Image: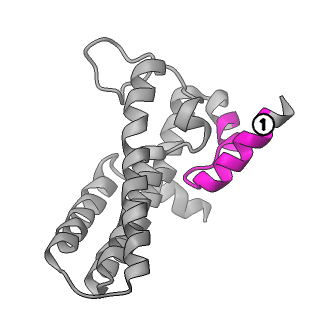
Amino acid sequence: MKRFREFICNLHPYLLCCISGPLTVAQIILAFVIRRPGNEALQWIGWILWWTSAVFGWLPIFTLRQKGGVPKGKSFVHTTTLVETGIYAIVRHPQMGTAWLLMCVGLMLITQHWVSIALGVPAMVVVYLDLLKADQREVEKFGDAYQRYIERVPRVNFVTGIIRLIARRAAA
């Protein structure tokens, strides 16, 4: 497992996004092109996950702009400060991780088509592998502070993140 993680961390920084991006775009197109009857309850759950992914996708932009020490004129991704509040108190990777994974699952439930699953599952695996790389990059950037953050806040599991956040606040 350690060798595999090292292999993934040594890949080109954008390679995994170049794989997962087209898979997810194809999945999105499929969701709006294929209209077929399916289990309506699963489709509703899919739409709920889709819109929940939008929340996890947009909140980090505002949070990082406000609290990330982003230099004037730079993108929100150019943070200079480790942000551990707001959405980042719940999950470490709200945008690239939680939002993307929720979107893929949501699209699979909306379409209920084997092609969507064939596109979504590999996209999710590749996104998760990219998150392993992202954690490594953040440890290199922020050091021990990020290592302690890893111990407190889950990578993408927002349910566990909410429970831990409530427990931390109750203990304080």
Which image quadrant is residue 78 in? top left
* Residue that extends furthest to the right in the rendered view of this protein: 171
Q: Quadrant of the C terminus?
A: top right
The answer to whether 71 is drawn above or below residue 28 in the figure is: above
The magenta stretch spans residue 163: yes
Give the magenta range. Answer: 148-169
- Name the foreground residue: 112 vs 149: 112
Q: Nearer the viewer, residue 87 or 2?
A: 87
Find the residue positioned furthest to the left.
33
The location of residue 59, given as percent across then percent down, is 42, 37
8 drawn magenta: no
Dot 1 falls on a residue whose secondary structure is helix
| Relative horizontal placement of residue 57, taking residue 146 as reference (left or right) | left
Q: With 39 as the anchor, is 36 left or right in this view?
A: left
Query: Residue 11, position in %: x, y?
Result: 37, 53
Quadrant containing the N terminus in the rendered view: bottom right
Q: Residue at x 53, y 37 (%)?
A: 87
* Residue at left offset 43%, top offset 26%: 64
Is residue 126 in sight in this rendering? no
> Horizontal and vertical percent for residue 37?
27, 88
Q: Position of residue 65 (x, y in %)?
A: 39, 22
What residue does disc 1 label? Answer: 168
